[in-house]
Image: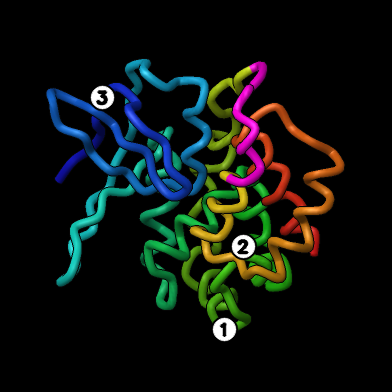
């Protein structure tokens, strides 16, 4: 129904951004809303996909068209809903995801929240050989802000991890490392946390 929305980033929350376009604030659910921290109050173009359920109409947002296409492929897999798909896509290593599917790496795939062995095997069965055209076009993201003076950056990143479906135990495991290493922004904290979680 919608391909993209062009507007100003009016607000950023742990699981979504609010994009204001023509006087309407669109709530766009994203894997890492903090990618847009450096773009607040600027006009951006966000690709969207609307999912209509009995109890909700939800718009999912993507920085690139290739990300949207990957999301659509993921939700076509039996056992993967939009929430799981967006959690899988929160990790910026989309090349690693595609490589894991192509090489039957069930262990890698089960590291994502809500993905068990059966779902991982289904992903491989349904998607193997069908993601090649997306490889190479999913790298590169919005420029990271040079410095974020907001002292709650780590807290926001932890809230985002929780919104993605990671358990309190998993979050606590990476929190110590994040505190030790530090970061300039919520986006950077979240990226680091997701990398650490994929190493477990």
- The image position of residue 152, as x and y in percent, is 61, 38
- The image position of residue 78, as x and y in percent, is 40, 76
Q: Would you say residue 158 sits in the magenta stretch?
A: no
Query: Is 94 positioned to the left or the right of 3 in the image?
Result: right
- The image position of residue 9, as x and y in percent, is 35, 26
Instruction: Characterize the local packing of mark 2: few (<14), some (14-19) or many (20 or more) Cα atoms within 10 angstroms.
Output: many
Closer to us: 50 or 23: 23
Where's the C terminus, which quadrant? bottom right
Q: Which residue is mark 2?
A: 101
Q: Secondary structure at mark 1?
A: helix
Q: Secondary structure at mark 3?
A: strand
Q: CA distance from mark 2 to mark 1?
A: 13 Å
What span is colored magenta in the figure?
Answer: 146-155
Residue contact between numbered discs 2 and 1, judged by CB atoms under 8 Å? no
Instruction: Pick out the residue farthest to the front.
Output: 151
Q: Which residue is mark 1?
A: 118
Q: Which residue is mark 3?
A: 6
Front of the two marks 2 and 3 = 3
């Amino acid at each position: 129904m919608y391909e993209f929305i062009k507007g100003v980033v009016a607000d950023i929350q742990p699981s979504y951004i609010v994009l204001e376009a023509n006087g309407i604030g669109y709530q766009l659910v994203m894997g890492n809303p903090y990618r847009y921290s450096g773009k607040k109050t600027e006009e951006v173009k966000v690709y969207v996909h609307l999912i209509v359920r009995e109890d909700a109409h939800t718009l999912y947002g993507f920085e690139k068209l290739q990300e949207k296409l990957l999301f659509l492929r993921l939700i076509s897999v039996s056992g993967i809903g939009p929430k799981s798909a967006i959690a899988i896509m929160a990790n910026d290593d989309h090349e690693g995801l595609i490589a894991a599917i192509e090489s039957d790496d069930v262990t890698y795939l089960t590291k994502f929240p809500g993905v068990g062995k059966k779902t991982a095997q289904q992903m491989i069965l349904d998607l193997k050989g069908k993601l090649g055209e997306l490889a190479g076009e999913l790298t590169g993201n919005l420029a990271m802000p040079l410095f974020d003076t907001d002292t709650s950056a780590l807290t926001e990143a932890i809230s985002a991890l929780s919104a993605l479906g990671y358990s309190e135990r998993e979050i606590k495991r990476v929190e110590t490392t994040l505190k030790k290493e530090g970061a300039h922004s919520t986006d950077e904290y979240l990226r680091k946390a997701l990398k650490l979680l994929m190493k477990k």
